[in-house]
Amino acid sequence: MFDKGRSKEDVFRDLNVFHNMDMKYSSGRILGSMCTKPDPVGLEAYKMFIETNLGDPGLFKGTALMEQEVINSLGNLLHLKNPCGHIVTGGTEANIMAMCVAKYLYEEENEGTPELILPKSAHFSFKKVLSMLSVKPVYVPLNNEYKIDVTKLPDLITDNTMAMVGIAGTTELGLVDDILEISKIAKSYGVYLHVDAALGGFIIPFLNYKNNNQLNFDFKCKGVSSITIDPHKMGLAPVPSGGIIFRKKKYLEKLSIKTPYLTKDKQTTIVGTRTGASTAATWTLLNYHGMEGYKKIVEKVINLTTYTYNKLNKNKHVTIIHKPELNIISFKVDNIDVDTLQKQLQAYGWIVSLAEYPHVIRLVLMPHIKKEHIDEFLVDLDIIIQKNR
Ligand code: 0PR
């Protein structure tokens, strides 16, 4: 920092330099991100509520009311009548909150080291959970579809089981675990089940809407205790907008901390000061798009995913790992090692990410990706394949 401030023009000249170094979603080149260009309508709402702080909700009564309405809407979207929860910074915080609740519930009746049953496909936020909460992981194997092998679950449950995690939209392959069957097991053994639908939460309900083919993943499954659902992924809200929904009020109450000198006497979030702008953006987008609007948004990305899948599938040098269930496609190319392919694609300006298990290229088709981007990508991929032959 300088002793004297600089002129605004001067500062903004530098800001522009930084800004120009950033990639933009609108370039269509970001093929490995679960975030996307925020919907301008949500952004308008975000800016309007930029000074709000839900850490002191008595000062921002309207915003606090909006958060309740958003939680109700998300709960209803997930087939829960009286939901409670919060709009948080993202899937990581949502998962940590759910696991805190599960641990506190466990500790009410148990003393041993708590165990968390989870698949290797779980997002790395659960690794943070393991270390922050001193929880022992118990990994449930995946079946040959890269989903939780449900038959293996019962044998893993012990007196020390604190919770189980199922995923509706895995980070790497975008696959949905058999939540209905997992939920039956959770219910019959009395185990807390958390579903990480950070990605799928804003996709599956809209695929299910007015569709006879229902994919079960939410509170309809009676053993599900909490769900992560992120507006800043397929909900198109600006970052940071995550969501955590609990089946019972008593679950959220486990996080309650007294806040004697604030306008409300308790908090049930991990963070204290937190923006209400994310809540305002999410409220706005839910109202503005409605079920039908989101269905159209989701159908567009799913159609583009299918288009890309069909094209890649026709390429005899490409091996697709799993038929996409949501908007993620993972593949590898014969004779090109995955890391090399990632670098070569990057040299053509394409930012793709890698999955760890299995080690493959992963494309996330978010709404900022258009058909023309995919067509250009496929041309470049072909050039790379030919060059490596
Ligand atoms: N749960 C699942 C299933 C996720 O895929 C993610 C993030 C999280 C939880 C954690 O969410 P937050 O990052 O909101 O805390 N999945 C993406 C990933 O790690 C996040 C991401 C987003 C990565 C944008 C890159 C990027 O450009 O791959």
Image (cartoon, rainbow, N blue to C red):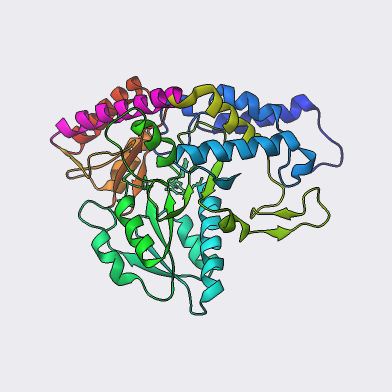
**Is 23 situated above or below 119?**
above
Please state the total of marks drawn on the protein image. Answer: 0
Residue 370, by quadrant, is top left
Q: Which residue lies furthest to the bottom in this view?
A: 112
Read off the magenta span: 292-316
- Main SS of the magenta part reads helix
From the image, which quarter does the C terminus lie in?
top left
Q: In this view, does 8 lie to the left or right of 304?
A: right
The residue at the point 30 percent across, 26 percent down is 303
Task: Pick the residue in front: 13 or 183.
Answer: 183
What percent of the width, then of the height, locates residue 348? 35, 31
**Is 342 situated above or below 151?**
above
**Is 82 situated above or below 107?**
above
Q: Is residue 238 visible from the viewing direction of this image?
A: yes
What percent of the width, then of the height, locates residue 250? 58, 58
From the image, which quarter does the N terminus lie in?
top right
Q: Which residue lies furthest to the left in this view?
A: 316
Q: Is residue 7 left or right of residue 350?
A: right
- Asked if residue 313 lies in the magenta stretch, the reply is yes
Residue 194, by quadrant, is bottom left
- Asked if residue 89 lies in the magenta stretch, the reply is no
Q: Which residue lies furthest to the front in this view?
A: 81
Task: Pick the residue in front: 15 or 293.
Answer: 293
The residue at the point 32 percent across, 29 percent down is 302
What percent of the width, then of the height, locates residue 272? 70, 52
The residue at the point 27 percent across, 38 percent down is 324
Q: Is residue 348 visible from the viewing direction of this image?
A: no
The residue at the point 72 percent across, 33 percent down is 62
Task: Pick the residue in front: 107 or 40.
Answer: 107
